[in-house]
Image (cartoon, rainbow, N blue to C red):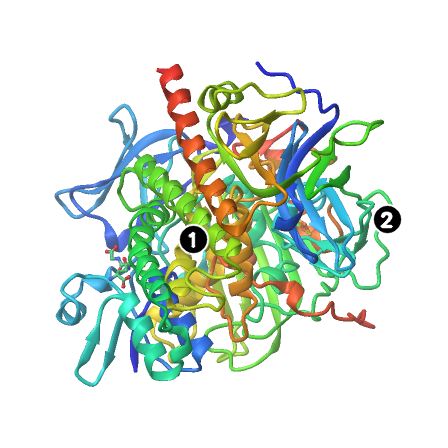
Amino acid sequence: MSVQAMIDEWYPVGIAAQLDAAGRNTMLMGEPIVVAKDANGQAKVTGGNGRLLPVKMRYGHVWTSLGEPKKDLFPIPEADQPGRRFVDVGVVRVRCSPLRAVENFLDVAHFPFVHTDILGAEPHTEVQNYKVEIREDVDEVWATQVKFYQPQAAKSASGGITTEYMYRVAAPTCTVLYKTCPPRPSEWDVITLFVQPLTEELCDVWPWMALFDDETSMTDLIHFQQTIFLQDRSILENQIPRLLPLDPGMEIPTRADLTSIAYRRWLKRHNYTYGAQLVAQ
Amino acid sequence: MHTLTTGPWTPVALSADLPVGTVIPARIPAGSIALWRSESGRLSASADRCPHRGMSLSHGFVRGENLSCIYHGWSYARSGQCIRIPAHPGLEPPETIRAKTFTVEEVGGVIWVATDEATTAPPAFEGLAPLRSMTTTAGIAAIEAAAGAKASAEGLVVPVGDTLCLLVSTRDDGQTLIHVLVTGAASAEARIGASRAAESLRRAAEAVQKENAA
Amino acid sequence: MKLYDYILSPSCYKVRLMAALTGVKLDLRPVDFHPGLEHRSPELLALNPAGSIPILEEGDLILTESSAILVYLAAQAAPEWLAGTKPEEAARVQQWLSFSGRLTANLGGARLHEMLLRPGDIGALQAQGIAALRELEAGLVEQNLRGERFLAADRPTVADIACFPYVALAPDGGVSLDPYPAIRLWSRALRSLDGFIEMPGIHRLHELKAEPTVEESKA
Ligand SMILES: N[C@H](CCC(=O)N[C@@H](CS)C(=O)NCC(=O)O)C(=O)O
Ligand code: FES
Ligand SMILES: [Fe+2]
């Protein structure tokens, strides 16, 4: 376990629209922090010893870092694209490693069993070959051409379709997926999972979406995503160990898990091990 | 510390609480297990951890003669061998994918699991029938104090003045598992009475435990 | 019949479940409970000054207690879900309906705390939740000894639906269900009923469907 390599990253710590002067006490990698709105209406994040932490407001959320970020927050160009609706799904706390929360998001094989009749259904369980790479120029993990049959791919979907996904790990605890957009076949819907690591075994998850969908009400969009994530939560809280094992002998991946394999390899390479278990116990 | 001489055997659950086609969580000194009964009635015990991605197998489901994991649906036979990976329908899972299994025996309505090689049979309690299981934060010493009786070598506590017996075992999480047993001939009314008496005993034992801790 | 509903609310799920089991059609009006706190908006407070959901609205009838809503649905569509004429059965239904209010406070409170970051004394909520589960377990053991599989009778009633959701979702609030075999069997019996529907956190009993034959794609 090492905080060091991950300390200079940006992490989500609140919904921008819900900032208030009173402030909210929360935690980042074991350190108590306060997220508040200052007299000028700007976000202000205070660390454990009263020091002011760097702040960014992006993608509907407040971001901060315990260290000195060397990079800007990762880009999501779709966040500036006209016509999209931006959805703050709301925080959900999960008793699991922040890295486990990200890894679960990168996986389609669980859809028929965990998101039954929504994102998947037996007998359509096969995961066909797809492409995975670590893009060196941007230092991100990408999986493309991931196809899966879905009974109800989105709130706006009216029947079963084969959905195509692209997955992207943009930061150790932040991941973005792009999926077939039923009302606009030429575009991708964007769904993200921004994870705030409270400790190595506890995280606050802030899903956020940028969608083309003019029909569905905002509340329905929120509820659709909350439904999906709460189905995952009961899985995430029951994986053993709670930490993500990076020891290859500990868990057995198959071809369907190539994204997870690449993610773990990338974490290891960068020493992103806050929330990881290095040696099997 | 109380030492019981049930050898490698731990009484983990009552037969009636594990109908065919179901899986339940249980604990043995080696850790958590998934205890399951196939459609044809065969009992199995495996480590409560799916070799794929660590999901607890006791959250899974039993179809036919196999146990499946709820996360990605991998199925395991009684032997622990993985026999199906739904993401790869054409693939025969390699023999190296297997869940660790344990020996299970059912005697007189009590299910026992062995941690090591079992050379003896688990104990049988003549004339007693299982009523219900409960867990308690009280240790065996506190239960003995509340019952006014010592546990036998097999873990049987016969409380003074009651018509019930408690089969006790300490779990790896520090809690005590109690199987309440009554004489086979007891009427429904007597059984309800015994269940209430067991609740009172547990309350008393937990009070003793709290007092001793204070 | 209009239900002000939230997909993650166990209390709203009671109503959706009852309606599904009895074939009643509900007109769902989703409420942005989290993160929007819409249940405390002027529009919703006008319907229910207590600021809670579910709210059932039909004509000028407004019901804001889930137990009352269950009784209303059953009385209209499926009276067999109400208590029969036996005094102890009628009393048991009332007993467990009242008890379900405690579950909302303790197990429900623990769940809101652990999942949606609601303030609260988590240790006390979980301890009260465990005490309630022990009572329920004892009650079910006794029912089984009487030859009855459900809380008030040998058939499910509104009392079972009132208690089931917060119990099934106890692990969301960090309260384990592992120590309760009778609750596990009861929960399974309810989940196996024709017309049963899930909510997030209560997954499908996949074994109720035979294992499908899956063809490998020729791609
Ligand atoms: N009147 C009770 C209220 C149920 C309840 O507590 N509902 C929760 C949602 S699950 C609620 O509205 N809570 C209001 C709040 O926490 O602010 C019932 O119908 O059983
Ligand atoms: S964790 Fe069990 S099948 Fe994937
Ligand atoms: Fe999922």
Residue A147, x across and y down, in percent: 66, 67
Residue type highlighted by circle 1? Val
Between B101 and C193, the residue placed more toward the observer is C193
Task: Choose mark 1 or mark 2, whichever is in front.
Answer: 1
Residue A63, x across and y down, in percent: 35, 44
Residue A240, x across and y down, in percent: 61, 38
Above-or-below relation of B160 to B213: below
Mark 2, Cα crowd under 10 Å, few <14 / some 14-19 / many 20+, is few
Above-or-below relation of B39 to B30: below
Mark 1, Cα crowd under 10 Å, few <14 / some 14-19 / many 20+, is many
Dot 2: chain letter: B
**Residue under circle 2?**
B94
**Residue under circle 1?**
C167
Q: CA distance from mark 1 to mark 2?
A: 40 Å
Quadrant the N terminus of chain C occupies: bottom left
Residue A242, x across and y down, in percent: 56, 37
Residue A94 is left or right of residue A103, and the answer is left
Mark yes or no: residue A112 visible.
Answer: yes
The answer to which image quadrant residue A60 occupies is bottom left
Residue C169 is left or right of residue C147, and the answer is left
Residue type highlighted by circle 2? Pro
Quadrant the C terminus of chain C occupies: bottom right
The residue drawn where x is 43% and y is 70% is C17
Mark 1, secondary structure of its residue: helix
Rendered image: mark on residue A227: none
Between C190 and A60, the residue placed more toward the observer is C190
Dot 1: chain letter: C
The residue drawn where x is 44% and y is 31% is B201
The residue drawn where x is 62% and y is 42% is B130
Mark 2, secondary structure of its residue: loop
Residue C210 is left or right of residue B211, and the answer is right
Respond yes or no on whether mark 2 lies under 8 Å from ligand 2: no
